[in-house]
Image (cartoon, grey):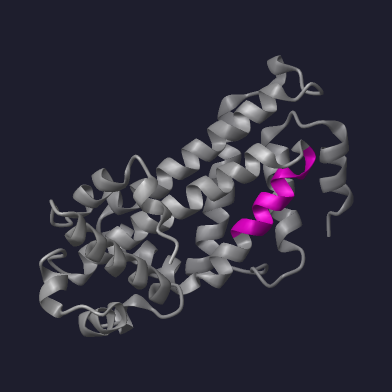
Amino acid sequence: MDEVWGQSEHWEDDLAAAGVSPTLQERSRAMRDRLIGTSLEIARRIPFEQISVLDLCQATGCSTGAFYARFPDKNTLFRAVMAASASQSGPLLERLVNETPFDEILPRMIKLQIDRFQMHEPFFRAAFRVSLECSDAWDPFRRNSNALASRYLERLRQEPRIDPAAINENNVRFAFQIMYGVLNNTVMNRPGPFDFSSPEFPKLLEQAMVAMIGCLPVPQAAAAETHRP
């Protein structure tokens, strides 16, 4: 498993906020992170409410006693799983914004996001349900969203074709709110008429973001408009 979350500066604080029992020894932390990593892999494939603590322990190779020494219950574990997912996706998306040619950032980012939400739908549906009961469970994803918008703003301000005076920070941040709102609603409610399998979906979402940002270079804005379904 890819335990990149252990490198996050927010990792231990996120676990404490989730209610995970503190660990003092490296061996205990390693078992805790193994349980989280295995649970994340399973939750991306199977609805979490269908998974028992015994299932998770057997998949990880630990006892139920080891589980309850670290997590008071399965919901606490899932909040830790949410933090792990956010710690993986945040750097991935920021790296895309950092390294992608400017005009390709939005289409590539939207494609990556759609792929993630579609492939890991059971996880996201469970995460939304948990966040309805405990809104701060979503905090790691809120932090990611804000950081991603901030990084995109930096790229906007570095782009020589864009007049800095034309950049409206609120518009840019709201464009990212639109993106996440559409992705979340599509997973949870499937409102239609478009969903992740619709060929028009990525371009329509890109058009919405471009229109909200309002200051992108003509070639990019024109490309989004040209592909309007």
Q: Residue furthest top?
A: 165
Q: Position of residue 5 (x, y in %)?
A: 38, 52
Nearer to us in this view, 190 or 39: 39
| Res. 87 in view | yes
Query: What's the magenta region?
Result: 103-113
Residue shown at 23%/63% (left/top)? Answer: 32
Q: Is residue 151 above or below residue 120?
A: above
Q: Nearer the viewer, residue 121 or 57?
A: 57
User: Where does the image place residue 36, in percent across and percent down from the top left?
Assistant: 31, 65
Q: Quadrant of the N terminus?
A: bottom left
Whether residue 106 appears in magenta in the rendering, the answer is: yes
The vertical placement of 183 against 57, above or below, is above
What residue is drawn where x is 30% and y is 67%?
34
Image point 41% across, 41% down: which residue? 143
Residue at point 61%, 27% (across, down):
154
| Residue 28, quarter of picture | bottom left
Q: Is residue 168 left or right of residue 43?
A: right
Q: Quadrant of residue 129?
A: bottom left
